[in-house]
Image (cartoon, rainbow, N blue to C red):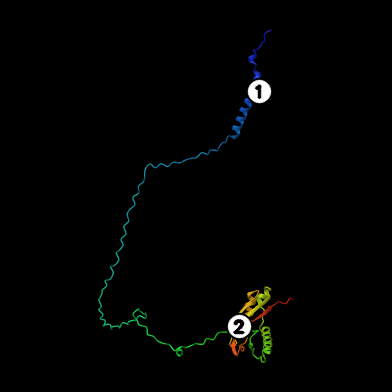
Amino acid sequence: MKPKKNPKANVGRNSSLYFAVGLNVMLVLTYLGLEHKTYKTEAKKIDVLMLDEQLDEDIPITTIDIPLPPPPPKQVVTEAITIIEDVEDVEETVIESTEIGQDDVIEERVVSVEEVEVEEVEDDIEVPFAVIERIPQFPGCEGTNAELKACFQKEMNKHLQKHFKYPKAASELNIQGRVFVFFLINKNGVVTNIKSRGPNQLLEKEAERIISLLPKMEPGKQRNKPVGVPYSIPINFKLEQE
């Protein structure tokens, strides 16, 4: 018995292949459709101005008559001749050279010892307060060196208490501490070379002000000669707690 259909004409044998090809084609078309972009176009109207004829306008020339300025006045130049008297002759001053040449003869002179003047230079000697033979005397202090030293300390404390004044700015800022003051009682009994070292400049200035008010003293003596005596004293700045 012969088959009715040709086996080569079987359409369904490649259906899976056709399905895959069709699916890919649809995916490609879908992708292109989604990625396609469109832009809005606006109609623009362009006006073109055409000039058939060019208008030439003749501008009339305006002439302005300005009068000329008057000529400058003529200046009359007169020559004045001044007769100067003869100048006196100036005598030239000849400056002789003070340099010595090789041909100059140097006068030999013997200088005696009596002709040489010796100037005595007094050195400012400073002797420490602890070892000086005679300490500086405060006004009103008398007695031996030990008594003078005790009187000096006593009068110095009175002076500090009398002239002590706490700086207002330091008090407001709660600045306190100890200031060491160094000064020199020179050979004339005057307090000089005042220096200080402390925690703050406000306290240092106040300490220097107090020491600068010290009175003139009788200078210290070493071998019966006035000498300078360096001295140092601490001043304590302390605020009282209320």
Residue corresponding to mark 2:
184
Image position of 31 with respect to 49: above or below: above
Question: Based on the displayed image, in which of its 4 quarters is residue 14 positioned?
Answer: top right
Q: Measuring 61% from the left and 83% from the top, which residue is drawn there? A: 184
Percent position (x, y) of residue 146?
Answer: 68, 88
Seen in the image, is 215 located left or right of residue 67? right
Question: Based on the displayed image, in which of its 4 quarters is residue 33 positioned?
Answer: top right
Seen in the image, is 43 located left or right of residue 25? left
Residue most extreme to the right: 242
Percent position (x, y) of residue 7?
Answer: 65, 14
The crowd level at tag 2 (other Cα within 10 Å; few <14, some 14-19, many 20+) is: some
Q: Measuring 69% from the left and 78% from the top, which residue is drawn there? A: 236
Q: Quadrant of the C terminus?
A: bottom right
Quick check: can you spot residue 219? no
Q: Measuring 66% from the left and 75% from the top, which residue is drawn there? A: 170
Three-letter residue code for mark 1: Ser
Nearest the eye: 153 or 104? 104
Nearest the eye: 191 or 56? 191
Percent position (x, y) of residue 51?
Answer: 39, 42
Image position of 200 with respect to 221: above or below: above
Residue corresponding to mark 1:
16
Q: Is mark 1 on a helix, strand or loop?
A: helix
Nearest the eye: 142 or 45? 142
Residue most extreme to the top: 1
The crowd level at tag 1 (other Cα within 10 Å; few <14, some 14-19, many 20+) is: few
Q: In which quarter of the image is the N terminus?
A: top right
Question: Based on the displayed image, in which of its 4 quarters is residue 157 positioned?
Answer: bottom right
Considering only order in the chain, which callout, 1 or 2, is on the residue closer to the N terminus? 1
Quick check: can you spot residue 13? yes
Three-letter residue code for mark 2: Leu
